[in-house]
Image (spheres, rainbow, N blue to C red):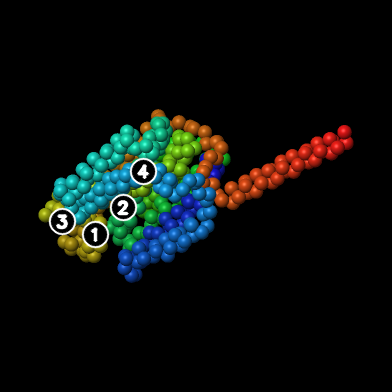
Amino acid sequence: MLPLRERPGWQAYIISIPWAIGSVLGPVLGGTLAVKTTWRWIFWFNIPFCVIAAIGIPVCLRLHLKEGSLWVRLREFDWFGSFMFVAATTSFLIPITWGGVMYEWQSWRTLVPLIVGVASLTGFMLYSVYISRIPLIARSLFNTPTAIVAYIGTIVQGLIVWSLLYYMPIYFEVAKNYSPISSGCAVMPFTLTVAPAAVVVGLIIKKTGRYRPSQFVGWFLTVLGMGLLIYLKKDTSMPAWILMSLVPGVGLGMLFSALGFAASASVSNADLPFAGALYSFFRAFGQTLGVAVSGVIFQNSFKKQILATAYRANADLWSSDASALVQVVKAWSDTGAEGVMKSRVIEAYVESLKMVWLVMTVLAGVTFIVSLIWTAEISLTRDLETEQGFRHDLDEKKTNDMIIFGAVNESMESFRTARVNGSDAV
């Protein structure tokens, strides 16, 4: 819809600002609904917004349709590849989400769909490269190291974001004894900085046409911020944990804009829509992995911590669903033998979260180094080439063409008249 150089500014206003509002209000509103009513209202609450979008997009987004009959356009779509990709991704992600929670990681219910998913994704890649005439995901999207690094960075960034969004509230509920509503407010130093940083970086990229500096600074701040979270303790003061949360929020927010335009700049104009879609997919994919990977790290570390205490007999039970155990721990007395047990379990929570932040720091550090080596600065300045521009632009173009065509016809008619009059005079 817009030239690549103009997109960062519009993306900042249209995508990042609404995302900022949602990311700030979401945790607080979700915690309020969970405490005051029931968690089911979290899902019912989204339905009106979905209905508005479903009606508003077809009505307001007036695009020029691609030429050709509907049947021809449907035949050009890779239906088999799409089915294979969706099935493979679903088979891979479902066991990752329930592994260690609903079923053990060693259970066949986890291993079988996970193995099938990995094998199917491998088969999908081979099919796309060697068999499909119009593949769902074109190989040209991965032709440059810059694009590959951008997609890897997108997965890692999504993974870290959701690790923070999922496990920081647990820290506040257990270590600080906050309610779900207060925990939602406590993550605001992180959520309040992610989207504004994305907006500012989008405007900077639009002004300068460069994404590498923002990407490098973003990864540096992410590594620094996640490293600072390792030092979170039960008695960390409020000013300290607020400052610790601000740093990774700014860093991860900068990456939201920088990584997307690094991926887009690496492809041709024809592949730009697919690069944007793939960027969004990898970010969502990383977010799904974030909860699962962090969960595995946290549960294994928590179990190890409990096994080192006098309460080792409960290690398997408590670590099987450490998130649900939070409310149980908060209900324990602060005095007597139960108080001693509560203090030790809280310490196990804090130490286990440190391991999560440590792994995230390492992942961010490795991605930072890879980005420094293989990310190139590719120009964002190029002409807009699209088959589906806004309809009012095309209508205006048709009007201008008709005016020009009419002027040409009028000139030709005047020329013919002049020739006739000249002949009569002779």
Q: Which residue is mark 4?
A: 78
> N-terminal of the two: label 2 or label 4?
4
Q: What amino acid is labelled 2 in the image?
A: Tyr
Q: Which residue is mark 2?
A: 167
Other-residue count near label 4 (Cα within 10 Å), few / some / many at <14 / 14–19 / ≥20? some
* Kind of element beneath mark 1: loop
* Kind of element beneath mark 3: helix
Q: Are the residues flagged by discs 4 and 3 in contact, CB closer than 8 Å?
A: no
Q: Is residue 199 above or below residue 323?
A: above
State the residue at coordinates (60%, 50%).
395
Q: Is residue 360 visible?
A: yes
Q: Which residue is mark 1?
A: 324
Other-residue count near label 1 (Cα within 10 Å), few / some / many at <14 / 14–19 / ≥20? few
> N-terminal of the two: label 2 or label 3?
2
Quarter of the rendering containing residue 424: top right
Residue 204 is situated, as x and y percent measured from the top left of the image, at 53, 41
> N-terminal of the two: label 4 or label 3?
4
> N-terminal of the two: label 3 or label 1?
3
Give the alpha-carbon distance from disc 2 to disc 3, as whole Å.
Answer: 20 Å
